[in-house]
Amino acid sequence: MKRVLFALMAFIVCQSGYGQITLEHSYAPNISVSVVNIEGDGYKYQAIDPNSKKLLLFNTDHSLWKTITFDTTGASFLSASYISKHLFNSDDALEVYLETNYRNGSYVGRIVNETGSILNTFDSAYYSSVYNLSGSWKLNVVKMDRSTRPAKIYSDIYSLPGSMPGTAIPGVNSGGGSSSFPNPTNSAMTVQYDLNGSSTAMMVITDASGKIVKQMMLSSLFSDVLINTGELARGNYFYSISTEKGLIDSKQFIVE
């Protein structure tokens, strides 16, 4: 009997030394969240609702904090980034840089505030990046002129009046590389990345034949990017992340 009790106690002590992974919250289907750090309000979860195309912001306890509605008439793809209060102006309202791809093949970038009002419009904006250059914050809008063949790509650099804290979380992705989830995916996929000391990187997405289907700039101010895969046909795809130092990572993902 004593041996049985001793063995049972040893088992309990042993098990108590292991932590348990517990499910904290499950978001609605097709809602894939990433993390943003907002001045004065701390970390939030963000997601684009693929049905309503609204920007959803959640508290860290997963309760809904804000919903931002945009005019998305004719849009086939919507991406929200650089959510901040004091990056694009000095008021205390939220602003967001919104990338929109339209069904007619055009690309438009906009700075929109939390009421949906458009503050700036950048026609032909293919993708953008924000970075801190020696204490001065810049917006790099990469534009595509599709009136010529081949299309021409060029950059417009804008000085920004404010700053932002960024979203990098200490201890996350400190060794470089990337990871993606969910994979397989059908509507949206989050890619977490570490640029290993570089300030910016280029992400290129190709299909199984090697054809480039999307390109975007990544910033070290952030630790992840949300990709709308709902616009992609079913099949196998690859993404690669490269900096001026060379290839950071390359991985396959599947769109179902």
Image (cartoon, helix red, strand yellow):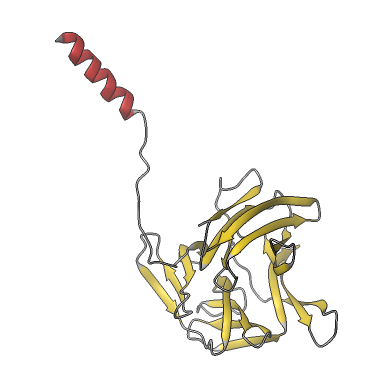
Q: Residue furthest left?
A: 1
Percent of width and height locating residue 114: 49, 81
- Along the horizontal axis of the image, is 26 left or right of 125? left
Percent of width and height locating residue 22: 35, 46
Q: Is residue 122 visible?
A: yes
Q: Is residue 216 above or below residue 168?
A: below
At x 69% / y 50%, what residue is drawn? Answer: 249
- Total labels: the figure holds 0
Name the residue nearer the viewer: 49 or 196: 49
Q: Is residue 225 above or below residue 88?
A: above
Q: Is residue 181 above or below residue 10?
A: below
- Along the horizontal axis of the image, is 9 left or right of 239? left
Percent of width and height locating residue 234: 57, 67
- Along the horizontal axis of the image, is 55 left or right of 126? left
At x 44% / y 70%, what residue is drawn? Answer: 57
Name the residue nearer the viewer: 79 or 151: 151
Name the residue nearer the viewer: 182 or 167: 182
Percent of width and height locating residue 145: 80, 83
Q: Is residue 223 visible?
A: no
